[in-house]
Amino acid sequence: MIPIKNKKKSLEATVEEMRKFSFNYIEKYTPSKQQLRTYLIKKYLRAKIPNTNKKNIIDLIDIVLRDLEKSKYINDQFYSQSKAKSLIQRGSSINKIRNYLMSKGVNDKYVKNIIDEIKENNQDQDFFSAIKICKKKRIGPSRNESNRLLFYKKDIGVLARAGFIDESLLDTFYGYGSPLGMHPDIAVPGVEMSTGGLGHGLAVGLGMACGAELKGQDFRTFVMLGDGELQEGSNWEAAMAAAHFACNNLTAIVDCNKIQQSGRVSEILDLGTLASKWEAFGWAVREIEGHDMWAIIDALDNLPYAENKPSLLIAHTIKGKGTSFAEDTHVWHNNTVTDAIYQQALDELKESE
């Protein structure tokens, strides 16, 4: 038995207590297996207790989940059917239903089965769902006829966010004339910012963070950066401005894998010691091992790192980690993935689990 203390009361990492918390959670939320697992992990591992063996706790959680699954207290097949029915009634598109179930960790087999069932029994599901969205949001055909053209792009964006993009477009990705280029473009419904031009993200994120301050909004803005991208000067202009305006609602995360498109960062344009460089620009800095999920959770839970400074999280990673052909090399920064390569990657990643 491993005693754990949190702010409310003392926890005991035992099968019996985990089952008790699981039953309470199941009764309240009727979760998927992955949702319940995430809940238990957060409950038992977010407490920062020294000398606590995380692996033992996770093993206990998996024992409890297997027992609950065997006893039918959690059943992802039933969960997927129930949630899909509810989402259909709420006017969700097939894409949105699929993405929702996948986000809850439902087995791919169950997701495929329920989507196939919806397509077979509800051939016009997307059409009727789109009509429901239009009525609910008062857009498209539900607008006054004189306003339809004026709000056309906005209305298309609403439908895109709801999942109403023709799946056939996916096969045109990066093709001539396709709206789906290599990088997201603001011309695509639902995309709020054109990306791909390195060095723009931090400045745009800074604008969002400053806007939140001006409007009295309390959301936090996150910007993902590559270490090779930091060779772009606009990043450092934004870094100076963020420190000057004391934007502690802005967090930048640097994927520091030491490799960029055409080679090693140190050979192309060395960045020196990143932590001290950002600190010199007025940021509060923290470094972690970027493949350690618990380190990531801890780092994000403790934001901001200083009261009146923007926060920088440097995540040290290995490019292509877990795949023999792509690990720690720039060759696969942009390369063609064949079916054979895809399967090889899946097999190697599974072996490394």
Image: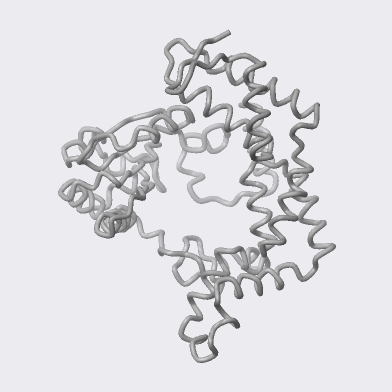
Is 169 or 333 nearer to us in this picture? 169
In the image, residue 70 sits, relative to residue 134, either above or below, namely above
- Residue 349: x and y, percent? 62, 32
- Residue 46: x and y, percent? 47, 25
Chosen colour scheme: one colour
Q: Is residue 258 left or right of residue 78?
A: left
Residue farthest toward the bottom in the current orientation of the protein? 146
User: Which residue does the image show at 17% across and 42% down from the upper left?
Assistant: 281
Is 320 or 286 nearer to us in this picture? 286
Corner quadrant of residue 23: top right
In the image, residue 147 sits, relative to residue 64, either above or below, namely below
User: Which residue does the image show at 67% across and 61% down from the upper left?
Assistant: 90
Corner quadrant of residue 177: bottom right
The C terminus - image quarter: top right
Residue 199, can we see it?
no
Residue farthest toward the top in the current orientation of the protein? 1
How many numbered marks appear?
Answer: 0
The N terminus - image quarter: top right
Is 274 or 91 nearer to us in this picture? 91
User: Which residue does the image show at 32% across and 54% down from the upper left?
Assistant: 217
Residue 82, can we see it?
yes
- Residue 106: x and y, percent? 70, 42
- Residue 239: x and y, percent? 22, 48
Q: Is residue 17 left or right of residue 116?
A: left
